[in-house]
Amino acid sequence: MAWLRALARLSRPSNKFPFSPPPPSFSTAAASFPGTPPLSPVAGYIAGLGPTVQGKEKPRVVVLGSGWAGCRLMKSIDTNIYDVVCVSPRNHMVFTPLLASTCVGTLEFRSVAEPIGRIQPAISHAPGSYFFLARCAALDPESHTVHCETVTDGTISASLEPWKFQVSYDKLVIALGAEASTFGINGVKEHASFLREVHHAQEIRRKLLLNLMLSEVPGISEEEKRRLLHCVVIGGGPTGVEFSGELSDFIISDVHERYTHVKEYIHVTLIEANEILSSFDVRLRQYATKQLTKSGVRLVRGVVKDVQPENIILNDGTKVPYGLLVWSTGVGPSEFTRSLELPKSPGGRIGVDEWLRVPSIQDVFAIGDCSGFLESTQKTVLPALAQVAERQGKYLARLLNQIGKAGGGYANQAKNIDFGDQFVYKHLGSMATVGRYKALVDLRQSKEAKGLSLAGFVSWFIWRSAYLTRVVSWRNRFYVAINWLTTLVFGRDISRI
């Protein structure tokens, strides 16, 4: 059994790293960077992770956020050069292109959640790398410090006061993402469900199944049944269209079979102010409209003026009753992003230069949906897409590795280093599923450019194949493939858990 003993030795976690300094201590004592005034803990904040000591510790990269941009950076950062500290209110990355499928049971929720420790293993066991379940409350570029507060949501920890601490950085990467745009419309935040996080998908699924079961209770009026089973989606972008397609598949394949008493009452309405899928080729938009209509989705052109607990009011005065309201009208900067005293790009995002640096502030970078090119760069602000964020994360990881190898990894040490090539984004195309084994693939680099455009079953196969290969870990790829096969053979799970 020598092979078994050898396998056991290999499976044990190892603490042998090319550079293994003692782990940094968490202290309330003040510390300082070379060339900066002493760091004094802000009132209510302990010092936490103090500044790194050059020659004894690796330089520290602090990443705020665990979305596409931040996780792609952490995956490619060289942990032989840097310690990595991630601060985020969630300990996983969400594979958002497949999130709509979890709402109706096509996929399980864990299939689209990738733990941070699997994306960057050093965070789990390297002496100077950590993940903190917290949110950034303030930023102090002068002392190279971020002020953080722990996240205490949930029934058990809701009574706990947030623990406040500080983390010093050598390089800071702001990858805070964005939040759903509500355009200041009354009642949206109170009554609508968004579709950006796993808990949003769980909320939608629970509410959808609850409404289905309530509609079968004796004594429910015909009018109330129709309201409970009216699913309204606001926004005709890829997320809204894909969710509508998934929902129509769920109704046709599962609701009609398992809720036969109320199958005539359930309907889906997609409301869009202009054209659905406006970034796609005209021919593909027409195909999507035809396919959604054929699947039973009612398309309405209108603008929402008010959202009430059981109705939405359109700009022409039309009252639309609903049981489930999903809001998918794009994203914008979060309140915290807007509050930061940093240069801003058009639209309120954090302004960056051609190397994704925040100008005039040493050692601070911004990537993903929270960032945009400054007007001085004469570049357009890139769309809030996963492929943009992923590409920026990969580029910045390569740049930081280059800086570290050149001796500029520590705070204030990269002033005279040549950053090399600027970030250039090349659009690879867009894809969206419209249900019933149909999808759209638009490989044009822009709306005006020419390129390959496909629609139908072949596009659906391309869509599934592409996203299956883009899932981060082999573990989750296996989950996704098995979930798809299980749904095909046995149908969707309708348990309300």
Image (cartoon, helix red, strand yellow):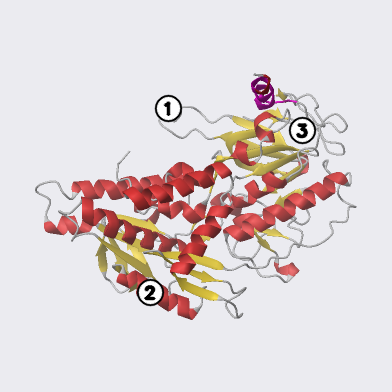
Amino acid type assigned to the residue bearing label 3 in the image: Leu
Nearer to us of marks 2 and 1 is: 2
Residue indicated by mark 1: 156
Amino acid type assigned to the residue bearing label 1 in the image: Ile
Q: Is residue 426 visible to the viewer in this orientation of the structure?
A: yes
Give the structural element (helix, strand or loop) at label 2: helix
For the stretch drawn in magenta, what is the main secondary structure? helix
User: In the image, residue 28 lies at what x, y percent?
Assistant: 70, 24
Instruction: Look at the picture and state if 284 lies above or below 85.
Output: below
The image's mark for residue 289 is 2
Instruction: Tell me if residue 14 is in the magenta stretch.
Output: yes
Instruction: Look at the picture and state if 145 lies above or below 174.
Output: above
Residue at 75% x, 55% y: name it. Answer: 357
Instruction: Tell me if residue 420 is in the magenta stretch.
Output: no
Q: Quadrant of residue 122?
A: top right
Task: Write the start and end of the magenta stretch as one range.
Answer: 4-15
Residue at 44% x, 30% y: name it. Answer: 158
User: In the image, residue 83 lies at what x, y percent?
Assistant: 75, 36
Instruction: Look at the picture and state if 464 lies above or below 426.
Output: above
User: In the image, residue 214 lies at what x, y percent?
Assistant: 19, 47
Q: CA distance from mark 2 to mark 1?
A: 46 Å
- Disc 3: CA contacts within 10 A as few (<14), some (14-19) or many (>=20): some
Q: Is residue 278 visible to the viewer in this orientation of the structure?
A: no
Give the structural element (helix, strand or loop) at label 1: loop
Nearer to us of marks 2 and 3 is: 2
User: In the image, residue 349 lies at what x, y percent?
Assistant: 62, 59
- The quarter of the rendered structure image containing the C terminus is top left
The image's mark for residue 39 is 3
Please state the total of marks drawn on the protein image.
Answer: 3
